[in-house]
Image (spheres, rainbow, N blue to C red):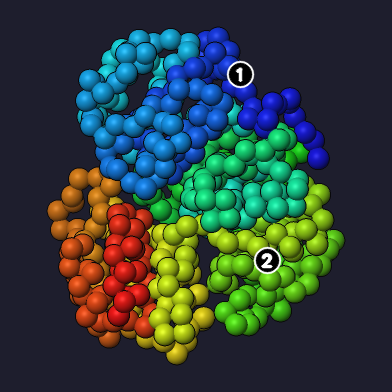
Amino acid sequence: MKMIGKYANGLGTLSPSPSGEGRGEDIKQVYLVGIGGIGMSGLARYFHKRGCQVVGYDRTRTDLTGALAEEGMRITYTDSVDEIPSEFKAPSESVLVIFTPAIPKDSAILNYFKNEGFDLKKRSQVLGLISKEMFTVAVAGTHGKTTTSTMVAHILKHSGFDCTAFLGGIASNYDTNVLFGLNNVMVVEADEYDRSFLTLHPDIAIITSMDADHLDIYGDDASVKESFKLFASQLKEGGKLIHKRGLPLESGISYSAKENADVFAENVYIQNGTFFFDFNSSAVKIKNIELGLPGLHNVENSVGAIQAALILGIEPDKIKAALKEFRGVKRRFEYIIKTDRRVFIDDYAHHPEELRACITAVKSLYPDKKLTVLFQPHLYTRTRDFAGGFAEVLSMADELLLLEIYPARELPIEGVSSEMILKNVKASSGRICAMDEAPGLVQELNPELLLTVGAGDIDTLIQPLKNILSNA
């Protein structure tokens, strides 16, 4: 494996600096507009670890922003110029301002930095600079990328190989979304939103899926696929592409959970709620792998992660040991309650294919239990574009509670509501409910198998629902 650059404590350098002037190590103050996002918070932790003063704004107080504050970062929830500290009021080589495209364009804080002449950088641009001279493993896909990138990082950590990692979720094994390593290897989740992943030039790229999504940005499915092809073309010289079998890519190593590919899983079986499988390639076979995460889709994710680890020279027995201990990502098939009498699972799924994989996994593990699904659609545009797909997949539920659409960065679209989904759902029972009604309805239903799914603020219901069901 070709190792590139010299780094202290695996934190890398920023050279040239994100401002385009001076050196990256001159950065002393970092302001993040939208610090509470999962990707932005990872950068906040990275710069805090480097000894920078880290300050940020987010509109919502969450467990994650609370954790950042406890770690020593200053956060405001008021979108006012008065909230910007004096040391961030004038452009300087020592000041870096990072923003997320999810921040509304009329944000007072965002527009102050723009109007005062700061050279603002997107999260993806900063990640691109950090990774520029590091040996980078980048994982992309419209779904599956968070779990797969976290698997890769966990294998490298658990095996003793080590890495630095920027993840799109909170890794349950480490209770964080950023890992710091002592070598110059970096694992990063490559986000396709706003074509962000095109700032990366990886040594190893994994592409888990290329389904239509973010059509408010891309316009159509063909543009989504073209963007992924561009990402694949940006491999460094001698780089390796690993991709799920069946994707429209002309080269690379294909992988699959159930079909013959360059590398694939076979002899998949479930024992006491745990998935086991064999990994097979022309070069190596790893038998009877115990996966610490359920679902055939996660078996498939692990096949791609295993291949990346093998390219890096990780020994098969160390890979096998790491996957047995893998505990997944918070809000990715996360067990909230798991007893003989009741099971409550929470998942971040917000695309029809993610929902299909999640619900299929739940039903394969608990075929004799009645499944109640509480789902919150995410974005008006996604609901408009995939209402039929959502209805088809949610029809797999026995009982459906459907929350109203979480708007995130969007304004309402006339005629687009959760009713678009519900009217075509064929579940035996389905209804729309408000957030404040959901706990009472769940208490009334007293489900033996509950699945909460969505990428909005549905996670604020998890603890109340856990309390209700634990005492029922």
Mark 2 neighbour class, 10 Å CA radius: few under 14, some 14 to 19, many 20 or more? some
Which amino acid lies under the numbered mark 2 shown in the image of this protein? Lys
Q: Quadrant of residue 430?
A: bottom left
Q: Secondary structure at mark 1?
A: loop
* 59 in relation to 416, above or below: above
Count of numbered circles in the view: 2
Instruction: Judge from the rendering whether residue 286 lies leftward or rightward of residue 302; answer left or right.
Output: right
What is the x, y in percent for residue 434?
17, 64
| Residue occupying the point 28% across, 15% down | 115
Q: Quadrant of residue 7?
A: top right
| Residue occupying the point 31% across, 54% down | 456
Which amino acid lies under the numbered mark 1 shown in the image of this protein? Ser
Q: Which residue is mark 2?
A: 324
Which numbered tag is attached to residue 305? none
| Residue occupying the point 27% across, 85% down | 428
Q: From where the camera sits, is residue 324 visible?
A: yes
Q: Which residue is mark 1?
A: 15
What is the x, y in percent for residue 18?
51, 20
Instruction: Judge from the rendering whether residue 119 lies leftward or rightward of residue 439; answer left or right.
Output: right
Quadrant the N terminus occupies: top right
Q: Secondary structure at mark 2?
A: helix
What is the x, y in percent for residue 259?
66, 72
Q: From where the camera sits, is residue 386 visible?
A: no
* 216 in relation to 423, above or below: above
- For the residues labelled 1 and 2, the Cα–Cα distance comes to 39 Å
Point out the residue furthest to the bottom here: 368
